[in-house]
Image (cartoon, rainbow, N blue to C red):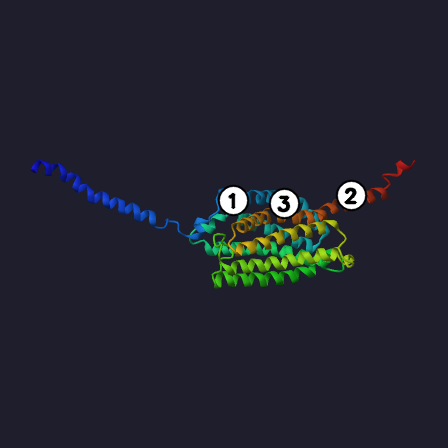
Amino acid sequence: MDHKHDQISPISTLLPAITDINSVVDSSSSSPPLNSDPNQSNCHGVLYTAALSIPAALFIVYLGFYLKKNVKKLSHRRSHVMIAYYVLLWLSAVLNLVWCSLQAWQCTSGKEVSWNLLSLLTESGSLCLEISLIAFLLQENYATGLETLAHTFMVSGLIVGADMLLKAIFVFGFGVPLFMDGATTHSVKWGMWTFDEILLTCAYGYILFVHYSKWRDKLPPRPAFYNYAVVMFMVHGTGLFACALGASSVGFGLWLYSFIGICYHTLYLPFLYITFLADFFQEEDLLLDNAYYSEMRDAGFFDSDWE
């Protein structure tokens, strides 16, 4: 009997240990993960950051390649309005690149304030350019188009300042996660973005309505401006649709909203530059060529062609 007791006793001593291990496994499987923060679970990966950062960096490289040439042209023509917009374009491009490169701040503990502040500044820079150009397109007198921008710049600055102040109050005062992609069910967040998209969609829709109406002569006679308005109307209209779906927590709406955000942060500034600023720098070359031709003609360099 004692011999049998000695054989069974090791097994009986292992049973409590096995029971303890099973209880630990069950408790660990039922407990939440270490990264239970909703921002952590919806954190963007490296591919998302690269998809944003690479086009933004390429645009900075492009601007830097022509920086010396463009600065020379700006100083020659002495257009303070265009200088201001060129500086604002550079500022917006740099902020956009920093914002695109620091997507991980959404998932980093202690970076919430820095991320919200960076997002607020980045959005304000792009929005200031966009609203200024909307106001420019809605002007009725285009005899001095560049001077018109000076009047609209102050108005757009006030609008963007009020928008920035309101969003800062919601973000830092009431804790609304406007710039946190992980927060997908916050009703105030979607309400704010929906309101912005409605205003911008209506503004571009009004420009297109006037263009195809009997009052089209009040708009600037440049087809590129209307192509810009058409594209931006489609972008903000799609963004409005995405916000409506996102407010209902529809998966496709969240994906579409993220896709529109990628397109806006990677393509809007280059599109704006091509539409409104590239012609300014190219026209300067034509003006200089005509001036050089006139000076050479007055000096008699082409008299031999008439002999």
Q: On the picture, is 1 further left or further right than 259? A: left
Amino acid tagged 1: Tyr
Where does the C terminus fall, quadrant-wise?
top right
At x 72% / y 49%, what residue is drawn?
224
Q: Which residue is mark 2?
A: 289
Q: Residue furthest right?
A: 307
3 or 2: tag closer to the N-terminus: 3
Q: Earlier in the sequence, mark 1 or mark 3?
A: 1
The answer to the question of whether label 3 and label 2 lie on touching residues, with beta carbons closer than 8 A, is no
Q: How many marks?
A: 3
Disc 1/disc 3 C-alpha distance (Å)? 24 Å
Circle 1 crowding by C-alpha within 10 Å: few under 14, some 14–19, many from 20: some
Label annotation for residue 29: none
Q: Secondary structure at mark 3?
A: helix
Residue 32 appears in view: yes
Q: CA distance from mark 1 to mark 2?
A: 45 Å
* Rendered position, 231 above or below 196: above
Q: Residues within 10 Å of mark 3 (few under 14, many from 20)?
A: some
Q: Amino acid at mark 2?
A: Asp
**Contact (Cβ within 8 Å) of mark 1 with mark 3:** no
* Residue ID for mark 3: 63
Where's residue 150, x and y in %? 69, 59
The earlier-in-sequence mark between 1 and 2 is 1
Q: Nearer the viewer, mark 1 or mark 2?
A: 1
Which residue is label 1 attached to? 48
Q: x%, y% of residue 304?
A: 89, 36
**Label 1 vs label 3, nearer the camera:** 1
> On the rendered image, what quadrant is the N terminus found in?
top left
In the picture as drawn, the residue positioned furthest to the left comes out as 1
Q: Is residue 109 left or right of residue 274?
A: left
